[in-house]
């Protein structure tokens, strides 16, 4: 098998704690700070940056007895759907090494699929856990915003992103979520709902009486093989006692545009700190403007520069109300749409990704097409809801993921239904 390039840094950190993850190995996405270990975010800008402290999730892994086996590859600063924009080279999909693993947590998903780690942590800003989980045939959970601490996560778009687990099975993903969830004094956006959780106990596979809502907008336009596999999994859930009904989320038509305005705007602000003075690659000598420009020109890749420029434009004087404010209005509409649907159904179901994993290099020349691949996942981040991607079967020999979305902090119902799909 060709080298997967799943890790940027392979370094083993043992824990002698006797917790629920004792004996388990975990890959940590390279945008999550790990004390004494290089944390590059997949960028040449942070090529030699060593984090001086542990993210809260890393501390909780150590307390739970996990062994960290390295920092996994990722799209630069989490910006991508294929894990091809890393400054350290692309990651390959273990299922078919000529294809992408999905992104931006592609290294984490590939490591779990290939058995290079038992479990992994990813981060999900617009689907970056669920996409690679679907493409690599494993389970990925994007928790409710605030359930898991983001302290120590290098921010890309902080109002959208969450750290979450990737694992071979629903119960293992739920067990990892139990370890990392809960309130954190270092992150004021966290809440107590995850304290003393037992999500693993929910993975019993009982869906009798559950009602699934299937948004027609998230089925139309998907690949034929993906749609067939999706409906097969819905039929299987029906056979186990669940029912489904078609629902409409009219706001979804605008979700993708709103997401990219908000995400790039936050990126332009968050990444301003990487100027070669406070953080990042030095721009060398010269006046401040020249040094600053040189550091960012040499340190950032093309996709990061594109998103910073888009975000800076959206926030600039004269365009803030035209783009950013309207995007926030659309975000509120998406949130209301989901709340209305959850008055009638327990979960929303759709294909995780509307396409099968592309071949390496196939989609890099068309950024708009890459952005459209996120259509089924980004509405969840705009609404700050929890979602899971679970393997639903195969089409043309490649994995297809089923996405289940739950109301805020109802991870247990989501995990229960997902475990019935396995």
Image (tube, rainbow, N blue to C red):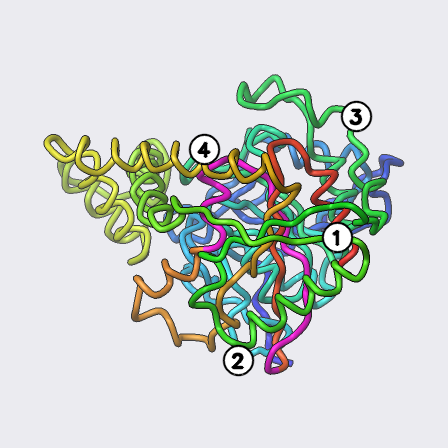
Residue 350 drawn above or below residue 294:
below
In the image, residue 278 lies at what x, y percent? 34, 31
Q: Examine the rendering and report whether any part of residue 36 can be seen.
A: no
Say which label, 4 or 1, has the lower sequence index.
1
The reply to whether dot 3 and dot 4 touch (C-beta < 8 Å) is no
Distance of label 2 from label 1 (alpha carbons): 38 Å
Distance of label 2 from label 3 (alpha carbons): 42 Å
Range covered by the magenta-colored residues: 376-396
Distance of label 1 from label 3 (alpha carbons): 29 Å
Residue toward you, 183 or 295: 183
Residue toward you, 251 or 271: 251
Say which label, 2 or 1, has the lower sequence index.
2
Query: Which-is-in-front pick, marks 4 and 1?
Result: 1
Residue 63: which numbered mark, if any?
none
Q: Which residue is mark 2?
A: 98
Which residue lies at the image location 75% right of the left edge and 42% below the top edge? Answer: 176
Which residue lies at the image location 65% right of the left edge and 75% below the top edge? Answer: 394
Distance of label 3 from label 4 (alpha carbons): 30 Å
Residue 336: which numbered mark, if any?
4
How many numbered circles are shown? Answer: 4
Residue toward you, 376 or 27: 376
For residue 80: magenta? no
In the rendered view, does 279 fall on the left or right side of 148?
left
Quarter of the figure with residue 390: bottom right
Q: Which residue is mark 3?
A: 196
Q: Which residue is mark 1?
A: 242
Which residue lies at the image location 36% right of the left edge and 58% below the top edge? Answer: 371
């Amino acid at each position: 098998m060709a080298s997967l390039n799943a890790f940027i840094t392979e370094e083993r950190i043992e824990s002698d704690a006797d917790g629920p993850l004792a004996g388990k190995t975990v890959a940590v996405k390279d945008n999550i700070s790990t004390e004494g270990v290089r944390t590059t975010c997949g960028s040449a800008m942070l090529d030699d940056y060593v984090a001086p402290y542990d993210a809260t999730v890393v501390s909780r892994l150590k307390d739970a007895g996990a062994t960290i086996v390295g920092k996994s590859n990722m799209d630069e600063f989490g910006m991508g759907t294929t894990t091809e924009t890393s400054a350290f080279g692309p990651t390959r999909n273990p299922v078919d090494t000529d294809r992408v693993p999905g992104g931006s947590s592609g290294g984490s998903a590939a490591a779990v699929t290939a058995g290079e780690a038992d479990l992994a942590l990813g981060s999900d800003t617009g689907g970056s856990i669920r996409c690679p989980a679907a493409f690599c045939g494993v389970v990925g959970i994007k928790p409710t915003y605030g359930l898991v601490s983001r302290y120590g996560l290098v921010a890309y778009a902080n109002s959208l992103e969450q750290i979450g687990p990737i694992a071979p099975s629903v119960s293992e993903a739920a067990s990892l979520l139990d370890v990392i969830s809960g309130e954190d004094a270092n992150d004021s956006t966290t809440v107590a709902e995850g304290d003393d959780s037992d999500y693993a106990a929910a993975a019993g596979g009982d869906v009798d009486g559950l009602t699934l809502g299937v948004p027609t907008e998230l089925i139309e336009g998907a690949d034929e093989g993906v749609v067939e596999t999706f409906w097969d999994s819905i039929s299987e859930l029906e056979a186990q006692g669940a029912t489904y009904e078609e629902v409409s989320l009219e706001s979804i038509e605008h979700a993708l545009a709103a997401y990219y305005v908000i995400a790039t705007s936050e990126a332009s602000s968050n990444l301003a700190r990487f100027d070669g003075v406070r953080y990042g690659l030095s721009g060398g000598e010269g006046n401040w403007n020249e040094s600053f420009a040189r550091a960012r020109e040499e340190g950032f890749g093309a996709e990061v520069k594109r998103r910073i420029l888009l975000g800076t434009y959206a926030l600039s004087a004269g365009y803030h109300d035209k783009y950013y404010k309207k995007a926030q209005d659309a975000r509120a509409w998406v949130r209301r749409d989901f709340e209305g649907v959850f008055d009638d159904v327990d979960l929303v179901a759709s294909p995780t990704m509307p396409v099968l994993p592309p071949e390496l290099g196939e989609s890099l020349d068309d950024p708009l097409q890459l952005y459209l691949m996120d259509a089924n996942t980004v509405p969840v981040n705009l609404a700050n809801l929890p979602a899971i991607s679970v393997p639903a079967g195969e089409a043309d020999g490649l994995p297809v993921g089923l996405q289940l979305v739950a109301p805020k902090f109802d991870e247990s119902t989501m995990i229960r239904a997902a475990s019935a799909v396995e």
